[in-house]
Amino acid sequence: MGKSFKKVFLILLCIPFLLIGCSSESNTDEGNSEGKTQVKITWRDVGEHDNLKKYLTNTFIPEFEKENPDIKIVLSPITASEGDYFSKVALSMQSESTAPDVVAEDSFMLNSDANAGYLLPLDDYVSDWDQWEYYTENLKSGSLGEDGKLYAIPGTSDSRGLWYNKNVFKKAGLPEDWQPKNWDEIIEAAEKIKDSSSDVIPLSMGVAKANGESVSMQTFEMLLYGTEDVLFDAETKKWHVNTKGIEDSLKFIDNVYNQKKLGPPLSIAINSNYSSVLFQEKFPNDEAGIILDGFWNTGNYSENGAVPLDNVTERFGFAAMPTQNGQEPGNTTMSGGWTWAIPAKAKNPEASWKVIQALGGKEQQAARAVSEGNLTVRDDSAEIPEYKEQAFISEATEYLKNAHFRPANDKYPNVSVEIQTMVEAVATGSKTPKQAAKDYASNVTRIVGEENVVK
């Protein structure tokens, strides 16, 4: 076989995998020689330190296949950025030949994928499931489509707050039990860090469009829901634009990145690896002071994490994000999480449901949460000792009392992209907060229609 022919043959061989995002599979049994029913699980693989992959491979699969010898689990992760994962997994669900049997769906994408007909309703399955009653009620509602049907089972939950480095704080003369009462106190603390340590990044928050939904949720919406305004009115089904809250949120970002120069350099801020650089390099090396981000980052410092640490609570703190002016209820957080769903074109929906049931068991739920540094979605799992012993678990759970959720509207993914564009434009200084808010209003109106916005 000539070299040129070999090259063409290999390219043709790879085309099907390119179409579904070059997913990498392990534990495959394509020939089904054992006569078992295969269940292919797809999720977003985040790379070397993918704790979900470790949990599935080392803990879940051995136990499940021992108890279900007639089922073979095939891992088929998609390695991609957050935004690319959503488009690639949607593409895979359009065909019976490429659709997974169990798919990880970010809760904010459920309505969009359900409306597109990609997901199987699970109401009939859940009606006979005796474990459903143990799931946290408000998380159940987050898995409902606009048509009122259930399209997924919650897999993880989360909350967000202000991470702070106690060594950096001590040098800046800041308290070890820091809890800012308003936005001004966050800025004041960051300014003290800047004055005391020129080699430390005072205050960080994600602003790069390349980082997708995390920018919308961890940064912009954490700010916006601390103002008097909202992104979307669930009762009127209208989007709010040109509000004071939107502009004030953008002014805070502008203050950090441009006016007071408190944020990371753009080489870090606009990098798609922003979170890894901050939490795996800068923060544990006392080179970052305050980071607005999620509780799950404790996973970086666990025994099997990227940067194992024994004294996490001695090194770091996790404060609640205050409201803009300290108004009631005093603090705010955003909550979301990943779910497990069954694609409408899955080959083995009954076997898929068996897998999802097992993934959602009491002990399994706690084990996954501990592995990833997330919050459990079951009330009874939260009582398991190993789960309760996690660093900052009580704080992260407490913040959920004032949690907000992303709009349960199929236009949200498109609006979210506009949020990311707006935030990056302000952080890089290419637009003023007022200009960016104006362009955002125009773009959202175009997406959802004039009749669905409140100005």
Image: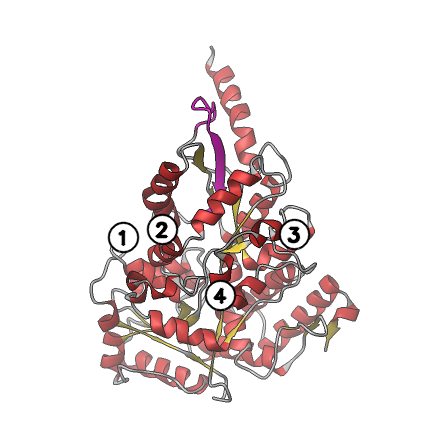
Where residue 383 appears, x then y in whole percent?
Answer: 34, 66
Residue carrying label 1:
304
Q: CA distance from mark 3 to mark 1?
A: 35 Å
Q: Report the residue marked by disc 4.
A: 136
In 3D space, how far apart are the residues under numbered discs 4 and 3 (Cα atoms)?
Answer: 22 Å
Point out the stretch of residues depicted in magenta. Answer: 29-45
Closer to viewer: mark 3 or mark 1: 3
| Callout 4 crowding tier (Cα within 10 Å): few <14, some 14–19, many ≥20 | some
Query: In the rendered picture of this protein, how many numbered marks are placed on residues?
Result: 4
Given contact means CB atoms under 8 Å apart, are the residues at marks 2 and 1 in contact? yes
Residue 219 spot, x, y in % from top left: 49, 70
Front of the two marks 1 and 4: 4
Horizontal side of residue 378 vs 286, given as left or right: right
Indicate which disc residue 51 carries: 2
- The amino acid type, in three-letter code, at marker 2 is Asn
Which-is-in-front pick, marks 4 and 2? 4
* Contact check, label 3 and label 1, Cβ < 8 Å: no
Q: Residues within 10 Å of mark 2 (few under 14, many from 20)?
A: many
The mark nearer the N terminus, 2 or 1, is 2
Q: Amino acid at mark 1?
A: Asn
Disc nearer the start of the sequence (4/3): 3
Disc 3 marks which residue?
A: 114
